[in-house]
Image (cartoon, rainbow, N blue to C red):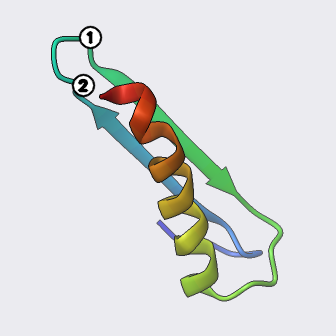
Amino acid sequence: MTGTRGAVNDLAIVFPPGRAAGLVAVYMSGSDKSLAALNRVHEQVMRALLPAMT
């Protein structure tokens, strides 16, 4: 979702193999960066969490 004042938010329910499901929430606001740049941050967060989920 994208909002005013540079807000970009994401929610994900993750299902790691053999483990309980989890919720990941990433909220960003107040940025003057482009939507593409903010989306890259969301991607980087999920890539950083991936090793803990596998």
Picture layout, residue 18 above or below residue 53: above
Picture layout, residue 6 above or below residue 41: below
Q: CA distance from mark 1 to mark 2?
A: 7 Å
Bin the neighbour count of mark 1 within 10 Å (Cα to Cα): few under 14, some 14-19, many 20 and up: few
Residue located 83% across and 68% down the image: 30
Residue located 44% across and 27% down the image: 52
Q: Quadrant of residue 7?
A: bottom right
Q: Secondary structure at mark 1?
A: loop
Bin the neighbour count of mark 2 within 10 Å (Cα to Cα): few under 14, some 14-19, many 20 and up: few
Report the front residue among 2 and 52.
Answer: 52
What x and y, as percent, mark residue 29? Answer: 75, 63
What x and y, as percent, mark residue 43? Answer: 48, 62
Query: Farthest residue toward the left?
Result: 18
Q: Secondary structure at mark 2?
A: loop
Residue located 72% across and 75% down the image: 6
What x and y, as percent, mark residue 14? Answer: 29, 32
Report the front residue among 30 and 36.
Answer: 36
Q: Are marks 1 and 2 in contact (CB under 8 Å)?
A: yes
Q: Which residue is mark 2?
A: 16
Q: Which residue is mark 1?
A: 20
Q: Amino acid at mark 2?
A: Pro
Picture layout, residue 54 above or below residue 35: above
Q: Quadrant of residue 28?
A: bottom right
Report the front residue among 48 and 30.
Answer: 48
